């Protein structure tokens, strides 16, 4: 028995456990504060024996730890494959994963502010590199899951006969772009325009819609709100029934990786690393490919 006359009784031991669990959860009730005061006075009275009791009070019944729940910050453009990866991983491991989907820039801001979570899988390596630079992510844990290939996307049948990148500045049409502050495809599109000496101002003059996620650009084509956008190749495949993809020539394009990294403040480092290993495994790649994602890259393609 851990309790005896003069030390804490069994009820007080339970109260101590309750208070400790509340402290771990980040809150304590007024009644628990009063209990802490009473117990502190008793510890002062009985000294080290009382402290020893606190150390050994776990000798009774202990609660089984709950199954780990990982928090994944995931780029919206990766969502279709990420959802399948999560389902497959959860079936094989005693772990659950709660995912937040948004533009990569928005996600970076969220995890930097909250400093909570376990995994980060944005739509571009730029955001992982920034997270590592800001000591938010573990550099050695980064792996590349797949590739995004920027692709022009237009309405079915290409009614305006869009031919390539220069039409975004030269051909009279309604352009949609991703917000480069919030979404990876927006930042990548601007880099591609700059690479090909296409005036940013000219593109901006034709822009009628700026999106917070890459999927919103494809939806804008589907709704007839814009005439041309740049999306990822995977998104173009997913929306193939409502629009046509126009490939950007290799020499004009800049491919981006889909990386994944473990966060520095992860509560479940081993489980988070297990998910990373699964995502880049042969099974993980099959899942990515089944959802239209590119998992290999030709050596002659420029990768950002």
Image: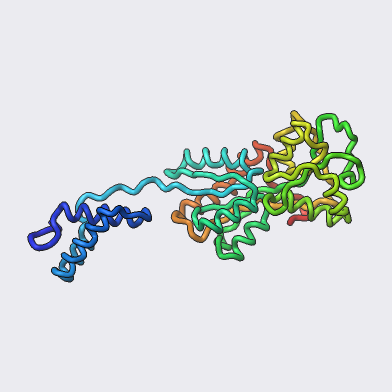
Front-most of residues 277 and 102: 102
Front-most of residues 272 and 152: 152
Is residue 271 toward the left or the right of residue 169 in the image?
left
Q: Is residue 198 visible?
A: yes
- Is residue 227 shown above or below 128? above
Image label count:
0
Quadrant of the image containing the C terminus = bottom right
| Occupied quadrant, residue 128 | bottom right
Q: Position of residue 37 (x, y in %)?
A: 22, 62
- Is residue 58 shown above or below 102? below
Which residue occupies 83% across, 53% down? 193
| Occupied quadrant, residue 200 | bottom right
Q: Quick one: which residue is furthest to the left in this view?
A: 5
Quadrant of the image containing the N terminus = bottom left
Is residue 35 toward the left or the right of residue 254 in the image?
left
Which residue occupies 30% across, 47% down? 64
Which residue occupies 48% across, 59% down? 265
Is residue 85 toward the left or the right of residue 257 in the image?
left
Q: Is residue 294 visible?
A: no
Is residue 191 toward the left or the right of residue 115 in the image?
right
Q: Position of residue 285 (x, y in %)?
A: 62, 44
Q: Position of residue 176 (x, y in %)?
A: 78, 42
Q: Position of residue 90 (x, y in %)?
A: 48, 41
Q: How is the image coloured?
A: rainbow
| Occupied quadrant, residue 233 | top right
């Amino acid at each position: 028995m851990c309790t005896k006359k003069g030390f804490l009784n069994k009820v007080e031991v339970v109260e101590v456990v309750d208070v400790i669990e509340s402290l771990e959860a980040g809150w304590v009730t007024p009644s628990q504060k009063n209990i802490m005061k009473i117990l502190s006075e008793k510890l002062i009275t009985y000294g080290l024996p009382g402290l020893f009791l606190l150390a050994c009070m776990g000798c009774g019944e202990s609660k089984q730890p709950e199954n780990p729940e990982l928090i994944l910050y995931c780029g919206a453009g990766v969502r279709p494959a990420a959802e399948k990866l999560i389902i497959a991983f959860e079936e094989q491991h005693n772990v659950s994963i709660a995912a937040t989907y948004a533009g990569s820039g928005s996600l970076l801001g969220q995890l930097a502010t909250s400093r909570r979570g376990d995994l980060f899988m944005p739509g571009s390596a730029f955001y992982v590199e920034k997270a590592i630079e800001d000591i938010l992510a573990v550099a050695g844990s980064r792996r590349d899951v797949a590739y995004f290939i920027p692709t022009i996307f237009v309405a079915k049948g290409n009614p305006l006969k869009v031919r390539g990148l220069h039409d975004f500045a030269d051909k009279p049409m309604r352009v949609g772009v991703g917000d480069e502050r919030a979404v990876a495809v927006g930042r990548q599109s601007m880099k591609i325009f700059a690479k090909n000496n296409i005036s940013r101002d000219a593109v901006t003059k034709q822009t009628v819609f700026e999106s917070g996620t890459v999927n919103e650009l494809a939806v804008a084509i589907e709704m007839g709100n814009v005439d041309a956008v740049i999306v990822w190749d995977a998104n173009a495949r997913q929306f193939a029934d409502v629009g046509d993809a126009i490939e950007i020539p290799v020499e004009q394009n800049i491919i981006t990786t889909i990386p994944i990294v473990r966060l520095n403040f992860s509560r479940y480092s081993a489980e988070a690393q297990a998910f990373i290993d699964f995502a880049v495994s042969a099974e993980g790649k099959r899942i990515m490919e089944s959802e239209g994602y590119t998992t290999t890259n030709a050596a002659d393609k420029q990768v950002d």
